[in-house]
Image (cartoon, rainbow, N blue to C red):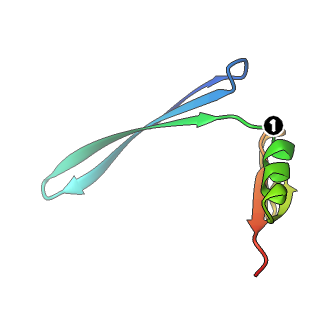
Amino acid sequence: LVEVEEDPQKRRLIRRIVTFRAAGRSYRRNEEEHRQILLKAADVSAALRSVGFRARVLKGYGSKRLAPDRKVLIAVKPA
């Protein structure tokens, strides 16, 4: 079970996740809350480059495209 609360004005995303797993003859319940700050991909990639990383911004993973306002960043620090 996943509940998502997004506030673009405050640049905040909160994701609440409830999972269940078998534990003998019953189930265990676990709850997580992930709080994220929403940043612009261009700002993050510029910050990475400024400290020596090579950074690329992609629209998805392979053939899987993300929503238009979501991006993937790949960063590698050369040896």
Percent x, y of residue 38: 69, 34
Residue type at numbered disc 1:
Asp
| Most foreground residue, 5 or 19 | 5
Query: Visible in this render: residue 32?
Result: yes
Identity of the residue furthest to the top in this view: 9
Vertical relation: 45 (above or below) 79: above
Left or right of 28? Residue 34 is right
Dot 1 falls on a residue whose secondary structure is loop
Q: Is residue 67 above or below residue 56?
A: above
Could you tell me which residue is drawn at 77 percent across and 42 percent down?
Answer: 70
Residue at the farthest left position: 25
In the rendered image, is residue 59 in sight?
Answer: no
Residue that label 1 marks:
69
Q: Residues within 10 Å of mark 1 (few under 14, many from 20)?
A: few
Q: Position of residue 51 (x, y in %)?
A: 78, 60
Viewer-proximal residue, 18 or 58? Answer: 58
Q: Give the position of the N terminus as an image quadrant.
A: top left
Q: Looking at the image, is 67 positioned above or below residue 59? A: above
Q: Quadrant of residue 76?
A: bottom right
Q: Position of residue 12 (x, y in %)?
A: 63, 27
Give above or below for 49 relative to 34. Answer: below
